[in-house]
Each structure stands twice: as structure tokens, then as C-alpha cells.
Amino acid sequence: MVTTDTLRVLYHPARRRIADHLMAHGAARVGDIASALGMPVGSVSHHLRMLEREELVERAPDLQTDGRTSWWRSARRTISWSVDDFAGDGSHEALARDAERANIQYQVDRLAEWKRHAPRAAEAWRRAAFSLDEVTVATPAELAELGDALVATVRAWSTAIDREDDQRREAVRVFMHAFPMSA
């Protein structure tokens, strides 16, 4: 189970950006991460160590060419949790709710960022981007089944991408929310 320490570490805005950067772009040096994200090198190093403590990123010593640079990569750890996992434990439940709100706000902010950028993006990217808004009926078990199927589909799709060919790829974000309308 995910702990509140993991939530506290991952849902810090700077650490989330660092984790996303490593997932999208692969292993990188601290200085390169700092440059790409407009952050001080010392701050990036600090946040990487916190992410490492929760096994969200890992050092990549196999990529080091000298002792002056440190390389890091995503640990590709799956984070799956619910506020209900912390129900009944006041402070932990409150922290989980805060992390859930931070995650949703982060997702909405990334979508808004794309929408601002979209008019200047290549037509192929504008046409490839999509959203899904479907209204139907389901039981809790059926909705859970849909969620499991979507997660499996996205993970299989992501894993099947040949990252070693010569095609130019951009980082993409996939997120969906499914919930009862009466809530």
C-alpha cells in the first residue's frame, strides 16, 4: 500500500515535475533536469533524494562518465491509491485528501497548459490529442472493471512503443476520471 510519506513526497509540485520529466524523457543528469525545468541544481538534487527514498526514482550509475555528474532515472513505480485507504486515520486521511486535490489540480493545470499551447502545435498533434466524456450506467464492480481494462490498455500501449527507432516522439500525458454523477 502507498504510504502518506509517498503521497507527501510525490505530490509536491517540484518533485512531481521532476518525476514526470524522468518518465517522459528517460535518464538525465541533475544539471540537465534543472535546466529543463528552470530549477536550481541544488534544489533538484534535494528533491531527487526525496523521490529516491520513496523508490520513485533511482540513481543510474551505469550512465556516469565521471564522478562530477549524477544520473537519475524513473523507477517506473506504479502509484495506485484511494483516500479510502486512509479512512479512519484523521491526519493521514486529511493528507490523502490534500494529495488527491493536488493531483487533480496538477492534471487540470497540464491540460490548460496544452490548450494554451495547442494553437501553435503541429496539426498532427492537435488532431491526435483527444478527450473522452461519456455518460452511461454501471455498477461499482463494472466501473472498477473498466478502470482495470483502461489501465492495462494504456500500460500495454506505452510498453509496446519502440523507443529505440528513429522517430521523433513528444512526452504525452493520459488521464481520465470516471465517477458516479450523483455523488
Image (cartoon, rainbow, N blue to C red):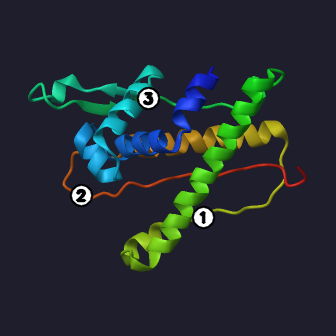
- Front residue of 109 and 31: 31
Give the Cα distance between marks 2 and 3. Answer: 30 Å
Q: Whole-Å distance between the Cαs marked 3 and 1? A: 30 Å
Q: Residue at x 32, y 44 (%)?
A: 40
Picture coordinates of residue 27 (x, y %)? Answer: 27, 37
Of residues 179 and 149, the one drawn nearer to the viewer in this rendering? 179
Q: Which residue is mark 1?
A: 131
Q: Amino acid at mark 2?
A: Gln
Amino acid carrying mark 3 in the image = Leu
Q: Nearer the viewer, mark 2 or mark 3?
A: 3
- For mark 1, does the 10 Å Cα neighbourhood hold few (<14), some (14 to 19), or many (20 or more) residues? few
Q: How far from the left and from the top, in percent, is residue 142?
A: 78, 41
CB under 8 Å between callouts 2 and 3?
Answer: no
> Looking at the image, which residue is at 61% across and 58% down?
108
Which amino acid type is shown beneath numbered disc 1? Ser
Which residue lies under the disc numbered 2? 167
| Residue 92 against residue 142 in the figure, above or below | above
User: Which SS class for mark 1?
Assistant: loop
Mark 3 is surrounded, within 10 Å at the Cα level, by few (under 14), some (14 to 19) or many (20 or more) other residues, namely: many
Q: CA distance from mark 2 to mark 1?
A: 25 Å
Nearer to us in this view, 54 or 12: 12
Indicate the quadrant where residue 112 lies. bottom right
Mark 2: few/some/many CA within 10 Å (<14, 14-19, 20+): few
The label number, if any, that marks residue 51 in the structure image: 3
User: Mark 3, mark 1: which one is toward the viewer?
Assistant: 3
